[in-house]
Image (spheres, rainbow, N blue to C red):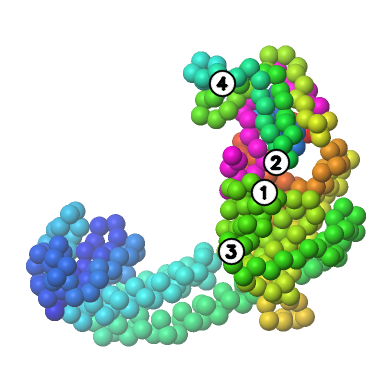
């Protein structure tokens, strides 16, 4: 049987990285729920929107319970499979890959 | 005057007018600054040979100190300066071999004068030989790298021209003040990003930004002194990316290849699905890596040296 692969989704400059079992449990147990919807604004003001529970456990995580679309006016819609994902952004060495 | 030299897992030495442990904590009795060196072997070899000349020994803060006559300070300083010259260069076998030969020579020398002359000879003869060999190696490697840049730029020029036609005649702006540059960048980016780009520009004198069109920005420098290379492109059904390298063109001409200091590396791309262009800078350690590895760094999938961050198989789904 093939080992399951770690899913990584990218839509524009937003990257969702699936986390492993241990971290997923920690996020659910110790993370602080911040919202029911993930909304991230791009540089040009348009928004990435994903209807999923948003938790903060150090970093930002989303808990996707069923296949859910992530939408953005300028990018094709991405269907996110169930799982717990770390929310990251594309990096830039000049900008120290830290985003506001 | 007396030379104090102390060992723990490093060496510390200085000159003092006192021969006792009081000197260690009394700056007013220290006639030189305390010199620190992580290397121990060479200094300890000298101290072992000079057993008959040790004036005093004491322990202070877990370090064992030896007090020797004043003349030993010059020898230790010479060793320190020689080691600094050897270890100025990153790890090459030539550098390491020179150090081991010096270590061997100091083990074998007899008496203060012989040891002093041995180290001096090493500094004046062997270290320049080592430098010359390393410089030749570096020059050959740089020539090979820039030859690759030139060849790849010619090879991938059609891709650059297809997706980034404005690279042929970009907007070029020269600023004499970094604050002016930052104010200009704020027209396109938020305050924090404008500041970061300005800092990047300050250190490198030349950057490229692409809010919509390509803009080349120079700080207190002339556009003629800089050159851009395309060191690889990759085109798929959903995107096209190219790795660009900026270099300060040197006045040296070696076998008709111009080469100079590499300033930065960036990935420029065109997202076919959203009809957007982008530019992201990547770490300098990725200089030898291909454009796909640079793109994976931008996505957070590899570290700054291009090695995968984790051992999982990944499935990357993008739009």
Callout 3–callout 4 Cβ contact below 8 Å: no
Say which of marks 3 and 4 sits in front: 3
Label 2 sits on a secondary structure element that is: loop
Q: Are marks 2 and 3 in contact (CB under 8 Å)?
A: no
Q: Which residues are magenta?
A: A77-100
* Left or right of A18, for residue A73: right
Q: Quadrant of the C terminus of chain B?
A: top right
**Which mark, by number, is residue A43?**
2
Q: Which mark is residue B77?
A: none
Residue B17 percent location from the top left of the image: 12, 76
Question: Label 4 vs label 1: CA separation?
Answer: 28 Å
Looking at the picture, do discs 4 and 1 lie on one chain? Answer: no
* Residue B5 locus on image (x, y percent): 21, 68
Q: How many marks?
A: 4
Name the residue tied to disc 3: B178
CA neighbours of label 1 inside 10 A, class few (<14), some (14 to 19), many (20+): some
Q: Quadrant of the N terminus of chain B?
A: bottom left
The mark that comes first in sequence, 4 or 2, is 4
Q: Label 3: chain? A: B
What's the chain of the residue with tag 1? Answer: B
Q: Which residue is mark 4?
A: A34
Q: Splitting the image into 4 quarters, where does residue A78 fall?
A: top right
Q: Residue at x 80, y 31 (%)?
A: A73
Residue at 74% across / 34% down in the picture?
A: A46
Q: Using the numbered discs, state the Cα–Cα distance from disc 3 to disc 4 in whole angstroms.
A: 39 Å
């Amino acid at each position: 049987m093939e080992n399951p692969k770690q899913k990584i989704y990218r839509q524009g400059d937003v990257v969702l990285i699936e986390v492993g079992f241990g971290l997923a449990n920690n996020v659910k147990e110790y993370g602080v729920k911040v919202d029911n919807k993930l909304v991230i604004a791009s540089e040009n003001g348009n928004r990435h929107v994903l209807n999923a529970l948003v938790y903060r456990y150090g970093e930002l995580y989303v808990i996707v319970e069923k296949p859910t679309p992530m939408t953005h006016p300028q990018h094709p819609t991405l269907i996110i499979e169930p799982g717990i994902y770390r929310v990251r952004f594309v990096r830039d060495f000049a900008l120290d890959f830290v985003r506001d | 005057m007396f030379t104090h030299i102390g060992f723990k897992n490093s060496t510390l030495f200085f000159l003092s007018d006192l021969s006792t442990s009081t000197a260690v904590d009394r700056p007013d009795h220290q006639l030189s600054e305390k010199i620190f060196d992580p290397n121990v072997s060479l200094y300890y070899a000298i101290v072992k040979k000079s057993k008959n000349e040790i004036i005093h020994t004491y322990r202070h803060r877990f370090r064992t100190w030896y007090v020797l006559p004043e003349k030993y300070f010059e020898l230790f300083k010479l060793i320190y300066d020689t080691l600094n010259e050897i270890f100025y260069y990153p790890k090459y076998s030539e550098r390491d071999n020179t150090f081991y030969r010096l270590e061997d020579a100091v083990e074998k020398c007899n008496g203060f004068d012989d040891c002093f002359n041995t180290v001096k000879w090493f500094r004046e003869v062997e270290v320049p030989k080592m430098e010359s060999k390393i410089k030749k190696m570096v020059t050959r490697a740089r020539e090979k790298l820039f030859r690759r840049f030139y060849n790849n730029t010619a090879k991938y020029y059609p891709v650059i021209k297809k997706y980034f036609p404005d690279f042929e005649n970009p907007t070029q702006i020269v600023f004499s003040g970094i604050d002016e540059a930052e104010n200009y960048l704020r027209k396109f980016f938020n305050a924090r990003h404008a500041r970061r780009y300005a800092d990047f520009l300050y250190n490198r004198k030349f950057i490229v930004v692409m809010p919509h069109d390509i803009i080349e920005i120079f700080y207190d420098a002339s556009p003629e002194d800089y050159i851009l290379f395309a060191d690889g492109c990759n085109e798929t059904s959903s995107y096209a990316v190219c790795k660009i390298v900026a270099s300060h063109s040197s006045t040296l001409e070696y076998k008709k290849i111009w080469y100079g200091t590499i300033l930065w590396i960036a990935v420029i791309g065109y997202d076919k699905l959203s009809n957007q262009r982008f530019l992201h800078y990547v770490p300098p350690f990725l200089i030898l890596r291909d454009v796909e590895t640079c793109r994976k760094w931008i996505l957070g999938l590899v570290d700054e040296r291009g090695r995968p961050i984790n051992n999982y198989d990944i499935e990357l789904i993008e739009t």
